[in-house]
Amino acid sequence: MVPFVPSYLLVSWILFVPAAERRNGKYWIDEAAVDHLLFHVPDLSEDFPLALRSLATAPWLNHDSLQLIYVTALLLLFGVVFELREGTGRTVLLFFGTTFAAAVIAGFALHLVYPTLFDHRILENAWGRTWSGGSAGCFGLMGALAARARRPAPLLAFFVLWEMFIWWVNLRNYTSAFHLTALTVGFIAARFVLPPIRRVSDRGHRPGQDEAIP
């Protein structure tokens, strides 16, 4: 199979660079031109088929240069490692599966609390803005990688603390709800659903090798 991580990075950079425009010291995609390809939280209750379609396209479109660089770094640090260990199929499954889960779970959580139970500017912005990019999928792979560690807790705690640090110094918005949801789903899927890949060494025992050849 064609490796996913370099393929995703190549496509996402190709989609971003020609259409990016400089604003406020960063490069941004023209959201008006690709609005129908981006995820909107209200679509979960107002137009669910559209929400599903957007979740197939939005992960490829990072909304600004900072997000694209961040996603690139996370995939090169953690996504490549997971793909080498677990294969392309599982990497694709977890990347898009945890993106979908994060959008649905965090999106419906926002439906439950905003604006009836809790009305805050962060939630208002989350409700009204578009969502795109591969950062949630990256956190899903990170959660899965932590699940494969001999001691998952330190690595998982590091990822959570890192997200909280980034939230404090830069994000200050609802993005962390998507990231932490994807991290949790990726961890649970790799820990309790997907069995580890078992590789047999060329020198190791292979089924039937001790059987007599007739």
Image (spheres, rainbow, N blue to C red):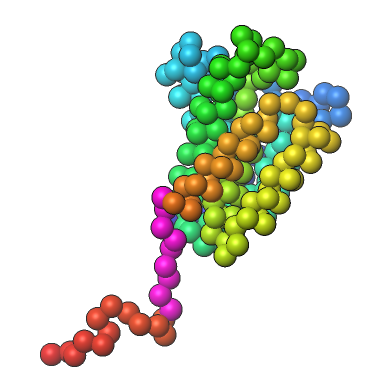
When asked about the image quadrant of residue 138, the answer is top right
Image height of 121 relative to 20, above or below: above
**Could you tell whether 21 is left or right of 4 in the image?**
right
Q: Which residue is rendered at x = 43% and y = 70% of the image?
A: 199
Q: Position of residue 193 (x, y in %)?
A: 41, 50
**Could you tell whether 67 is left or right of 100 in the image?**
right
Q: Give the dominant element type of the magenta stretch: helix, strand or loop.
A: loop
Q: Which residue is rendered at x = 19% and y = 90% of the image?
A: 212
Q: Which residues are magenta?
A: 193-201
Quadrant including the N terminus: bottom left
Q: Position of residue 55 (x, y in %)?
A: 51, 28
When asked about the image quadrant of residue 99, the answer is top right
Q: Nearer the viewer, residue 88 or 161?
A: 161
* Residue 33 in sight here: no
Q: How many marks?
A: 0
Quadrant including the C terminus: bottom left
Q: Position of residue 141 (x, y in %)?
A: 57, 48
Q: Indicate yes or no whether the magenta region holds residue 194.
A: yes
